[in-house]
Image (spheres, rainbow, N blue to C red):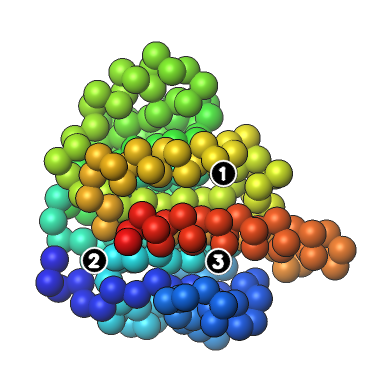
Amino acid sequence: MTELRREQNLLLDFSHVYPEGIERQAEGLKRINLSDISGTDMYCTREAADEIRKRLKDWSPRGIHFLDSGNYHYVTLFFAEKIHIPFSLVLFDHHTDMQEPMFPQLLSCGSWAGELLRRSRYLEQMILIGPEEKSIEGIDQKLRDRIIWLKESDRKLADEERKKINLSLPIYVSIDKDVLSPRYARTNWNQGNMSVNILENILLEVFWHQDVIGVDICGECSLLEPLQQLSEDEKVNGETNRSLYQFLSRLFG
C-alpha cells in the first residue's frame, strides 16, 4: 500500500473536546486542527468533505486516529477510502451507522457505514459488534451479504458468524465508545454495556488473527453539558482514551 503515504497517530480536533496539549503527553500523537471547517457537525457538506480530505491527504490510514465525538464518525470513510486493496472493517458501535440519509447529498454520522459499503470496491466484509438486533433488521438488504453481525450476548450465533470472517483479509478497525457502558465512556449518544476489558480482549483477538491496517476512535462527550457533568465525563473519557491508546500502541508495536 505504498500510496498510503505517512503513517502517524492522529488526534482530529473538530470541537476542541480534547484537552489542550494532550498530544504532548501521549507519545507519537499529532493534533490536526479541523475546527475552522464549517458544515461538519453530524452532517458533512461536500465542501467540508473536500477540505477534510485535503488536510488528511498526507496521512495513511495506518496508525491510531482519534476522531472527536460520534458526530464526526463519518471521517472513518475518509481513511477507509485510502485503502486500495481488499480489506474488512470491524465496527464497534452501539448503532449500525447505516441509516438512510435524511439529506442524500450530505454524508452523516448515521449513514457513513452504509455509504462506505456502497462506494468501496475494496471493502469485502463489514463486521459489526455492538448494535442491537432491531438496528440490524433495519439495514438495507442490498448491503446485508457483506455484513457479519457478532451478537456478543448470543455466543452460539456469534460463533456461527465468526466462521464467515475471511481471515486472509487485512482489517481496519473503527471504535465508537458508545458501544461501552457509561462506566467507561460518556458520549453524546445512547450507549451499550460493553466493558473496556471486553473491548480490549476482542481487539487482541483481531490483532492476533489478521493484519490490522489502522484503528480510529470516536465517542467523546458534548461540550454543551453543564460544567460539573462535563468535568466528570471528560475524566471518564480521558481514562478510557489513555487506556486504549496505550493498549493499541503495544499491539502495533
Q: Residues within 10 Å of mark 2 (few under 14, many from 20)?
A: some
User: Residue 232 appears at what percent x and percent y?
Assistant: 79, 59
Mark 1 crowd level (few <14, some 14–19, many ≥20, 10 Å Cα): some
The residue where tag 3 is placed is 68
What label sits on residue 145 in the rendered view?
none
Labels 1, 2: front one: 1
**Marked residue nearer the N-terminal end (3 or 1):** 3
Image: 202 above or below 221: above
Q: Which of marks 2 and 3 is nearer the N terminus?
A: 3
Q: Name the residue under label 1.
A: 196
Residue at image x 31%, y 18%? 160
Residue 56, how many percent across, how many down? 35, 78
- Give the Cα separation between the discs numbered 1 and 2: 29 Å
Q: In which quarter of the image is residue 169?
A: top left
Mark 2: which secondary structure?
loop
Q: Report the residue marked by disc 2.
A: 82
Determine the CA span between mark 2 and mark 3: 20 Å
Q: Is residue 98 above or below residue 158?
A: below
Q: In this view, does 238 lie to the left or right of 6?
A: right
Quarter of the picture holding the N terminus: bottom left
Give above or below for 98 relative to 11: above
- Quadrant the C terminus occupies: bottom left
